[in-house]
Amino acid sequence: MGNDKTNMIVAIALSLVVLLGWNYFVAAPRVEQQRQAALQNQQAQTQAQPPGVSPDGVPSPAPKEGGPAAPVPGTNPSSPEPRDAVLARSPRIRIETPALSGSVALKGGRIDDVKLKGYHETVSDKSPEIVLFSPAGTETPYYAEFGWVGQNAGPLPTNDTLWTASGETLSPGMPITLSWDNGAGLVFRRILAVDDKFMFTVRDEVENKGSGAVTLFPYSLVSRWGKPHTQGYYVLHEGMIGVLGNDGLQEYTYDHLAKEGAYGGANTKGKAWQNVTGGFVGITDKYWAAAAIPDQQTPYTGAFTERTDGRTQVYQASVRADGRSVEPGATVASTQRLFAGAKEVNTINAYEKNLGIKQFDLMIDWGWFHFITKPMFRALDFFYHLFGNFGVSILVVTAILKLFFLPIANRSYVSMAKMKAVQPEMTSIRERYKDDKMKQQQAMMELYKKEKINPVAGCWPVLIQIPVFFALYKVLFITIEMRHAPFFGWIQDLAAPDPTSILNLFGLLPFAAPDIVHLGIWPIIMGITMFVQMKMNPAPPDPVQAQVFTFMPIIFTFMLGSFPAGLVIYWAWNNTLSVIQQYVIMRRNGVKVELWDNLRGTFRRGASKSAAAKS
């Protein structure tokens, strides 16, 4: 690469390309998608229609299912209604666990009311709890349903079926049994159980008291009405997700699903995987998810569908097992599970291990570089449990990584120090062969060989830092553990940008700063550390290179202003450690540290320019 200045410029250019590319492909929101999502969420629900049945035999719910038999006086049946009003119309059993609150509708037997106790909409514990499930008839219906489909079996449970419950509250260690007699020889029972986190176990039983055998197919589904607001980032998957046997991980965004072929009717599109064993299907957001989990040893058909009803899209992830023959006097059962909650890493991993759910850890979008992001999270989580602060954990992990890569970094900085020591000879070679670039390069290479200098060694510190940067960004962005995780002082959410702003002097002026330029205290600290790190090296003789060095910290400061605070803190801390490390190595190799001279020269030039402008 020629010399240490070239190495630094290449390293800076690499970082700039990474950040610009990341910002363009990752951080840039899909504005049009969000606009369409907001428009769809504002659309009213259409009139009730009979439920359809997809080719795999799973009911495709229609709008207003579970609603009242007649319109509530003073309301329009085609418009969404307040959540509390809809919940009050159906008799319910309460859900009460350490992690969840909500209810199960006895009319229809759906799990359609779930709130997450430990998670709030903002960093304030007084803000509303996160609502995951809401019943049909509300503005954003989202629920799970279980049941049986079949033919010539008499009436089967539907969304209008009124079940009888054995108790009033579903809680850990206290299951509830729902029962219903179809009056045609079949008795249906549903045993609901829930653990202390986010997993429901649903055991559906059918007893045949009739005189003839019947064949029934157990199913489960997660249904979501209306396209939700999505983050719109390339590194984050939101939408349909599943692991379907040997077909592995399947991820379909809401827009992708709409491009699939017809499935079950003119208004329905989707895709199905038949005769698969193991896995799950569901719908995922950034931090929350709902998934239907079939018996891991029984073959099933899994499907993702989108059904258009009027102006409303209904997104559904469903599983349907093979038919079960129920002989007279016999009882058959089907056990399935429902995950409905926060995508906590340790909780998800425990479910995969303890319940044997195939690749359930893929519910969290670790990305292609999971071999880096997962260990990064493990390290951060380990030190979080030691210090109780994820910000401190970031500082500790950064220091450990510095120690881990110390041999490589040392060789790099030693090589850079040697290049500074032979700087006069390099300058002489450039002057001697300024008209012959070939001989100049040959002389340089001979000098490198003589002094045992590796000209590309200066790039290694930045090249090593790039995957660490990616991994930390991914962990900060996708893991719920980082959501609303405080540091110290004004940083109350490491996964969000620094909330302070230079536009109101960081809160000193009595007005809320507009979000035109997102530049807080920590990005400025980061820019200062980057400026100091660059001043560790002599100023390049080329004026263009000098301008690049001058403006690079400013550019990075504004670019990182909108990045998660945790990432900016990491970058600033890493820069600080790099400055200390380079300073010590240069002193040990007898090379002059240019920092103080460069700083004095910078401020003197600035003062001289100001004086000249005044004169």
Image (cartoon, rainbow, N blue to C red):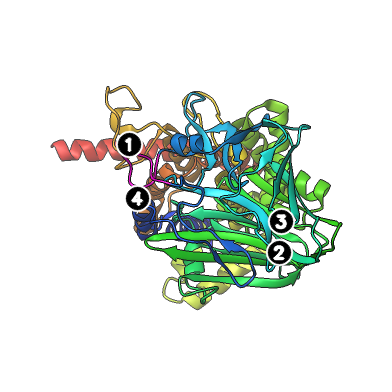
Query: Which residue is under mark 2?
Result: 153
Under mark 4, the amino acid is: Gln
Q: Nearer the viewer, mark 2 or mark 3?
A: 2
Of the numbered discs 3 and 4, the one sitting upstream in the chain is 4
Q: Nearer the viewer, mark 3 or mark 1?
A: 3
Under mark 1, the amino acid is: Arg
> Relative to 267, is 511 above or below?
above
In this rendered view, identify the residue nearer to me: 521 or 311.
311
- The answer to whether residue 577 is seen in the rendering is no
Q: Position of residue 344 (x, y in %)?
A: 66, 41
In this rendered view, identify the residue nearer to me: 426 or 110.
110
Of the numbered discs 2 and 3, the one sitting upstream in the chain is 2
Of the numbered discs 1 and 4, the one sitting upstream in the chain is 4
Q: Is residue 75 magenta?
A: yes
- The answer to whether residue 48 is seen in the rendering is yes
Local crowd size for mark 4, using a 10 Å CA cut-off: few (<14), some (14–19), many (≥20): some
Helix, strand, or loop for circle 4?
helix
Residues drawn in magenta: 70-81
Image quarter of the C terminus: top left
- Judge left or right: residue 496 versus residue 289: left
- Alpha carbon of mark 1 to alpha carbon of mark 4: how far? 60 Å
In this rendered view, identify the residue nearer to me: 527 or 537.
527
What secondary structure is the stretch in magenta mostly built from?
loop
Q: Position of residue 92 (x, y in %)?
A: 59, 36
Q: Is residue 171 magenta?
A: no
Local crowd size for mark 1, using a 10 Å CA cut-off: few (<14), some (14–19), many (≥20): few
Which numbered circle lies on residue 42? 4
- Judge left or right: residue 154 versus residue 602: right
Query: Which residue is under mark 3?
Result: 371
Helix, strand, or loop for circle 1?
helix
Query: Which residue is under mark 1?
Result: 604
